[in-house]
């Protein structure tokens, strides 16, 4: 056996646990999901039959799906953009020394450790007009607002998402900043560059790839938003705050239509897959840069 | 070591062995329930059975509490995969039609022991598919102290009714006889926007979240006005009655008789609005009585009656347990179910905090919870439940989706009633 062949065999053997795990946890459920998407598979009907593209036809002709998709994309872009900006701003702030930095650093990370469902339940109480702390405090300063009213619910949901996930963007931005070569800043300082010039001419260009990854990771995560909104609004009124995740959940577990739910999930996978090469490429660019 | 100690140890070891042998001979039946008062109460019944009747039956019951929010979702996947993991499923009147293909008929149930509306709500195609546990229905909750002030403010009441609803109305201090006009006018009278002297900010607490359980509450309005989802098997909401029922909620929202936050309200928020003294009236689940009667502004001032209407009706459903058709322990499961269907078992359930569907047991508990008298009366006189069709649960959810924009005043009944009928028709196919 040649050395090359031995290496090939060894690489397959060493990769085998990962490949088996991926096959069991990713490939197999994916295959089952696709199979279900092409089946008439309803809880109220005992038999499962092949249905061709019926579920997909049903799906694309359902306005609710498109409303949900539209809301999801709008919501995901909004929260991701703000979280990236806030996370980056916080990272810049924490990249310098100031009193109580460690304490504040820990506090910022607290929300990300709380399950979104739990956070939503907490805020349903905290923001409740009748018994909530926040409306009570706002009333003290003369502001009588309903944070769950139709006009303010999008903003309320956005703020909750920011509370939960800004720390994620912050952590990634902060770690990227930490890995920046300090000599570059020293050179810029010697050359007389201002803080703004340093930010826009040095920091941002160097971190571009990292920030793009943070943006894509959060965007993909936001597109899967479910628990926070489901608990806060149930996707309503009507379907005005319904995400695709809620649509799929309801299709499967409320309407008992597993075929339709799987078809929606397949469509979402197909929509998201094109992002993956971009993310992988950016990771590679970043890796090569390091 | 003394001889006495050795003998004691030997005796204990022998008992453990005998116990082990006995339990090995017993068949273990697994049952799903959800956590909360029902799960806690049932655990007491299970423990009692395992220590008593279960030994004779050679059946040991093991109860699994799934999450309260997702028990039915988990069960759906188990059923669809024809799982044998659990022998007895947790179900409900509004789900039994959907679950029926995966359940075995429960035989030998003495229906006369149960509230008729509850036990009948678990019949699918003429077969009793589940055994009722807790019965739930709706009350109109109101503040007695506030309603008592209406006659003394008749002129103001009529003026507010005229300006808000455009109708000539006089106060009706007896909520038992309220039509929706009476309820809406009273809600307007106790809304600060129209009556700055009102002790409550809003007259009504409207649970208008896009949630299927809120459709059940809205259904009281529909039924109370003489409507129903279907007429001769066809959708029936795009009708004057259907639209009138939608308009009741639309009026409550658009006239500001409830908080703008109502669009996110369900059970807990409705309770909070009543307890905090921010609302004077609400249709709410009977389970809320135990809390509302002892806390906040409603403490000692809580009145209950049937939901308003020209022919009052209240939704009734029962939580229930049912036999998994694919269980390999049908005989043992049936023995446990037979025990559960007895009055002593349900008495133990009630003593532990459950609300069984047996009127004889509920009557005994009236001194502890006076609302049980109303529950028995209303379930019999005014109770209804939608037919346990395979898509009943789906229709509830679909209507919540379609109607909640009307409930919160985003859309009118004219814009929505056709969509509501279409939603039902789609699920009928």
Image (cartoon, coloured by chain):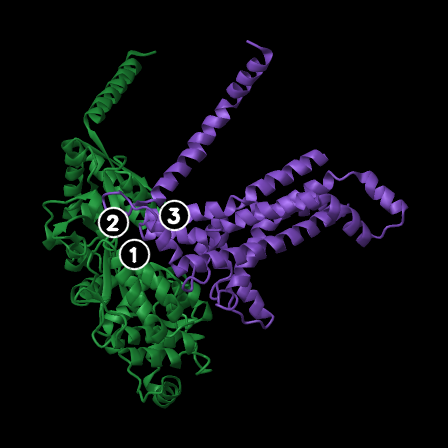
Residue located beneath label 3 in the image: A263
Labelled pair 3, 1 in contact (Cβ < 8 Å): no
Q: Nearer the viewer, mark 2 or mark 3?
A: 3
The earlier-in-sequence mark between 2 and 3 is: 2
Task: Give A261 or B11, whichever is nearer the viewer.
Answer: A261
What SS does tag 2 mark?
A: loop
- Residue A44, which numbered label? 2
Q: Are marks 2 and 3 in contact (CB under 8 Å)?
A: no
Identity of the residue drawn at 25% across and 52% down: B95
- In the drawing, does residue B118 fall left or right of residue B418? left
Q: Nearer the viewer, residue A191 or B23?
A: A191
Left or right: B247 with respect to A271? left
Q: Write down the residue under mark 1.
A: B394
Residue B260's place in the image compared with B44, above or below, is below
Does any portion of residue B368 appear in the rendered image? no
Point 46% across, 29% down: residue: A21
Which one is closest to the eye, mark 3 or mark 1? 3
Dot 1, how many residues are within 10 Å of its Cα: few (below 14), some (14-19), or many (20+)? many
Q: Could you tell me which chain the residue with mark 2 belongs to?
A: A
Q: Residue at x 39, y 37 (%)?
A: A31
Output the letter for the chain in purple: A
The answer to whether residue B33 is visible is: yes
Q: Chain of mark 3?
A: A
Name the outermost residue toward the top: A1
Task: Kindly indicate the quadrant of the structure image that contains residue A109.
Answer: top right
Q: Is residue B391 left or right of residue A130?
A: left
Residue A270: % across, % down = 47, 46
* Marks 3 and 1 belong to one chain: no
């Amino acid at each position: 056996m040649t050395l090359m062949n031995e290496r090939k065999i060894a690489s397959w053997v060493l990769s085998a646990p990962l490949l088996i795990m991926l096959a069991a946890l990713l490939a197999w459920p994916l295959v089952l999901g696709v199979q279900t998407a092409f089946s008439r598979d309803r809880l109220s009907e005992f038999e499962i039959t092949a249905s061709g593209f019926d579920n997909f036809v049903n799906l694309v002709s359902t306005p609710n799906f498109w409303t949900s998709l539209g809301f999801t994309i709008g919501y995901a872009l909004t929260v991701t953009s703000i979280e990236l900006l806030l996370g980056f701003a916080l990272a810049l702030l924490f990249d310098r020394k100031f009193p109580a930095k460690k304490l504040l650093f820990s506090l910022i990370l607290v929300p990300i450790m709380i399950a979104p469902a739990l956070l939503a339940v907490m805020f349903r109480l905290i923001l409740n007009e009748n018994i909530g702390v926040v409306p009570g405090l706002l009333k003290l300063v003369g502001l009588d607002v309903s944070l769950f009213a139709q006009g303010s619910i999008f903003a309320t949901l956005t703020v909750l998402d920011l509370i939960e996930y800004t720390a994620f963007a912050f952590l990634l931005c902060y770690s990227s900043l930490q890995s920046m070569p300090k000599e570059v800043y020293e050179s810029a300082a010697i050359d007389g560059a201002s803080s703004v010039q340093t930010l826009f001419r040095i920091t941002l260009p160097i971190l571009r790839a990292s920030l793009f990854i943070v943006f894509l990771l959060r965007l993909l995560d936001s597109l899967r938003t479910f628990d926070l909104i489901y608990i806060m609004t149930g996707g309503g009124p009507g379907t005005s705050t319904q995400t695709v995740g809620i649509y799929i959940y309801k299709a499967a577990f409320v309407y008992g239509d597993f075929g339709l739910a799987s078809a929606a999930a397949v469509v979402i996978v197909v929509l998201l897959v094109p992002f993956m090469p971009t993310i992988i490429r950016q990771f590679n660019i970043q890796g090569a840069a390091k | 070591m003394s001889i006495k100690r050795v003998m004691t140890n030997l005796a204990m070891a022998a008992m453990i062995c005998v116990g082990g042998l006995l339990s090995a001979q017993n068949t273990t039946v697994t049952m799903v329930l959800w956590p909360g008062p029902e799960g806690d109460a049932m655990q007491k019944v299970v423990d009692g059975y395992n220590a008593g009747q279960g030994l004779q039956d050679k059946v040991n019951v093991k109860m699994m509490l799934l999450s309260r929010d997702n028990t039915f979702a988990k069960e759906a996947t188990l059923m669809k995969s024809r799982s044998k993991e659990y022998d007895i499923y947790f179900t409900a009147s509004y789900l039994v039609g959907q679950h029926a293909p995966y359940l075995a008929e429960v035989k030998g149930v003495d229906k006369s022991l149960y509230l008729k509306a509850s036990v009948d709500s678990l019949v699918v195609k003429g077969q009793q598919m589940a055994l009722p546990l807790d019965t739930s229905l709706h009350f109109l909750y109101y503040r007695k102290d506030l309603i008592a002030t209406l006659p003394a403010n008749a002129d103001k009441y009529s003026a507010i009714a005229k300006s808000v609803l455009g109708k000539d109305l006089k106060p009706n201090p007896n909520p038992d006889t309220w039509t929706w006009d009476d309820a809406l006018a009273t809600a307007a009278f106790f809304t600060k926007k129209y009556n700055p002297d009102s002790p409550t900010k809003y007259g009504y607490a409207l649970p208008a979240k896009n949630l299927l359980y809120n459709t059940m509450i809205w259904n009281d309005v529909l039924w109370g006005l003489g409507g129903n989802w279907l007429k001769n098997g066809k959708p029936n909401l795009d009708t004057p009655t259907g639209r009138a029922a939608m308009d009741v909620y639309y009026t409550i929202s658009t006239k500001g008789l409830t908080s703008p936050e109502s669009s996110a309200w369900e059970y807990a928020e409705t309770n909070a609005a009543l307890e905090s003294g921010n609302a004077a009236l609400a249709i709410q689940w009977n389970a809320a009585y135990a809390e509302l009667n002892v806390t906040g502004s409603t403490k000692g001032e809580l009145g209950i009656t049937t939901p308003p209407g020209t022919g009052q009706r209240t939704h009734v459903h029962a939580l229930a347990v049912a036999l998994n058709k694919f269980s390999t322990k049908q005989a043992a499961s049936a023995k446990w179910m037979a025990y559960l269907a007895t009055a002593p078992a349900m008495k133990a359930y009630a003593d532990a905090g459950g609300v069984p569907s047996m009127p004889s047991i509920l009557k005994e508990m009236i001194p502890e919870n006076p609302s049980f008298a109303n529950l028995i009366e209303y379930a019999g006189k005014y109770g209804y439940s939608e037919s346990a069709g395979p898509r009943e649960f789906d229709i509830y959810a679909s209507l919540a989706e379609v109607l909640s924009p009307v409930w919160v005043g985003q859309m009118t009944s004219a814009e929505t009633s056709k969509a509501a009928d279409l939603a039902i028709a789609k699920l009928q196919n």
